[in-house]
Amino acid sequence: MNKVIIFSAPSGSGKTTLVKYCLSVFPKLEFSISCTTRAPRGSEQHQIDYHFISPEDFRGKIAEDAFVEFEEVYTDKYYGTLKSEVEKIWQTGKTVIFDVDVKGGVSLKNYFGEQALSIFIEPPSIQELERRLISRATDDAETIKTRVQKAKEELEFADRFDEIVINDDLSKAKIQLEKLISEFISS
């Protein structure tokens, strides 16, 4: 059976760090590159971290039914998973790993059902999450404020995921994820 692993979390929870770790430990996993209309952050690169496209192009793909799921996270800031990306990975015999926002994670779990393991990465606290976002130095104060408010709302979705991993100690979170993913991909 083709499988997918879904990672979701509020921004700043350490999700991307944990996804990269899982990719380094499990050669059977392959990252699904999402589409987004936002600008690249930091050292992000087109077709490596995301497919960076215009809002017009994104809306065109919506009209073509090209997405497994998509979300307008902020006005004209879309994120989505292309069906073609998932199929391409499955054709290589690998398990797809997603790094998506919380609503996208819920949508993906609904779409893939038992083929999916959905994992919610929870920050130790809202205060710690805010500290992480500030120390990242990729967003201005207003953007950080918006992200923290959104995180408070996203935490309410945690119980809609198969597993919750609290990222208060990175090494413990890594061990917990190794166990969850090993069991899922071998079942």
Image (spheres, rainbow, N blue to C red):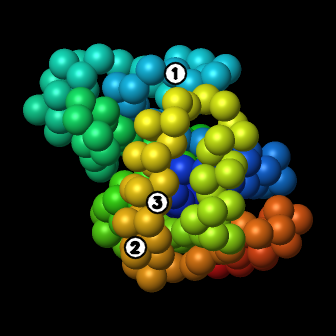
Q: Position of residue 51 (x, y in %)?
A: 45, 24
* Label 3: which secondary element: helix
Q: CA distance from mark 3 to mark 2?
A: 10 Å
Q: CA distance from mark 1 to mark 2?
A: 26 Å
Q: Amino acid at mark 3?
A: Ala
Q: Earlier in the sequence, mark 1 or mark 3?
A: 1
Disc 1 designates what residue? 40
Q: Residues within 10 Å of mark 2 (few under 14, many from 20)?
A: some
Q: Amino acid at mark 1?
A: Pro
Disc 2 designates what residue? 157
Q: Residue at x 17, y 28 (%)?
A: 59
Q: Which mark is residue 186?
A: none
Q: Are marks 1 and 3 in contact (CB under 8 Å)?
A: no
Disc 3 designates what residue? 151
Give 3 or 136, whichever is nearer the viewer. Answer: 136
Q: Position of residue 117 (x, y in %)?
A: 53, 70
